[in-house]
Amino acid sequence: MRLSQKRNLALLIFLNLALIISAQQRCSFDEQWLQKKQQPSFQSRINTIEDRIQRQINTQTNLDVRNSYQIPVVFHVLWNTEKENLTDEVIATQLDILNQDFAGQNSDLSLVPNSFRPLIAAANIEFCMASMDPSGEPAVGITRTRTFVDSLSLNQVYYSSGEGQDAWNTQQYLNIWIANLGNNLVGFGSYPGQNIAAEDGVVIDYRVFGLNNHPRLNLGRTLTHEVGHYLGLFHPWGAGLFNSDCDGDDQVVDTPIQSTTYSGQCPDGLATIPQSCGSLDMYMNFMNYTNDACLHMFTKGQQLRMLATLLEMRPSLLNAAACLEVNQPNPQKGVIKIGPNPTSGSLYVSSFLNESSVVRLEVFNLKGQIIYLSQQDEVEQFFSQAINTTSWSTGTYIIRVELGNQTLVRKILKY
Ligand code: ZN
Ligand code: CA
């Protein structure tokens, strides 16, 4: 390619990028991805992650799709004007929408065309409002931070030193930052390994959060889409801005390859389903850019990929013990959760109880010496205890949990 052609190509890419940004697309995942791709080690890191996810998908016996998996969520509201300070009710409504969309319980599921109906998934991943803060204290999973700027960039959102709010431990919580992101950005969800830990999570503009007045993104589906990225999903056209040659792929077998984004469109009810790349387009998939009113489903392949990603790349979310009873309609009674493991800070032990119980915790070092002991009598409904491990030397420990007539013994690694 001659230099002038290269320059023209670069200009074309730049103009397209500018067009996309000015059109305020649903999500900035592809732009963020291309930026990160400039780092020399990025692609090999992503390849390693892809291998791990694929291995997890292929060992399907380990993927228990019947179980339900719960992820604690903390919402960070960053506000300057009153209307940006979204109420607890708006946040609760958005959480409901997220859970309905993931569970295949959204009321507009009936609008999925017949040809795609067999692929509809009821993903077994639930989201709860965190009810315990990182230090183990009871909390509502919402923080509120007054900012003193009109709008925030991604770099500002993630840090208390930059008008934003520091994440709660991103190994234990899904962090969702809500802010005025100006006119360039609507939402972004970080793929596992894409961002450093402090910036891992979802960022969303307050104008597309929950049920809202946005002309196209008004039903709370931007969050559903971004959480899809957070759990390892790409757009149907793959990781990149354009797929006009149809060689982009999302690593999910049951989502058809497509070349268009459906940004600003809502093709429900058309006599013929739009096509590209030689197949019908699943324009109603949550990972498309279609208007909220025409987004309805995840597929079974996406469900499997999200679950594999959760178990392989984000397993400590499941041990975080921060989902408490008020937010859980169907707590798994008697299941004792211990985590995170390995740990360097607090170790949380929790369980829902069938009946009033005695709960006794003991931790031993490998010499058999007891280094921690606590006992509570007559615990009702829910038990939760944070054990501070910061003074322990690094190494292996044994924890023994006695809960009513159940006993659980586990190895703990302190690092
Ligand atoms: Zn996206
Ligand atoms: Ca696919």
Image (cartoon, helix red, strand yellow):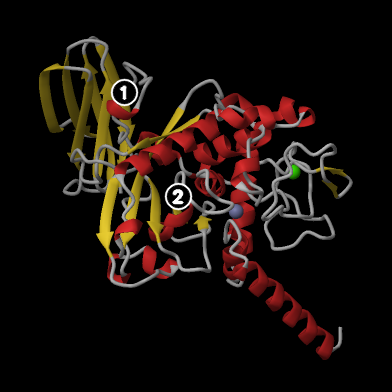
Three-letter residue code for mark 2: Phe
The disc, 1 or 2, on the residue closer to the chain's N-terminal end is: 2
In the rendered view, would you say 203 is above or below 328? below
Badge 1 is on which residue? 336
Instruction: Return the x and y of residue 261 as percentages of the image width and height.
Output: 71, 54
Label 2: which secondary element: loop
Which residue: 70% across, 41% down? Answer: 252
Residue 171 or residue 329, whichever sits in front: 329
Instruction: Return the x and y of residue 279 as percentages of the image width and height.
Output: 86, 42
In the rendered view, would you say 94 is above or below 175? above
Tell me the number on the disc at residue 133: none
Three-letter residue code for mark 1: Ile
| Distance between mark 1 and mark 2 Cα atoms | 34 Å
Which residue: 67% across, 71% down? Answer: 19
In the rendered view, would you say 292 is above or below 97? below
Instruction: Return the x and y of residue 343 as percentages of the image width and height.
Output: 30, 44
Instruction: Return the x and y of residue 236 as percentages of the image width and height.
Output: 71, 48
Badge 2 is on which residue? 209
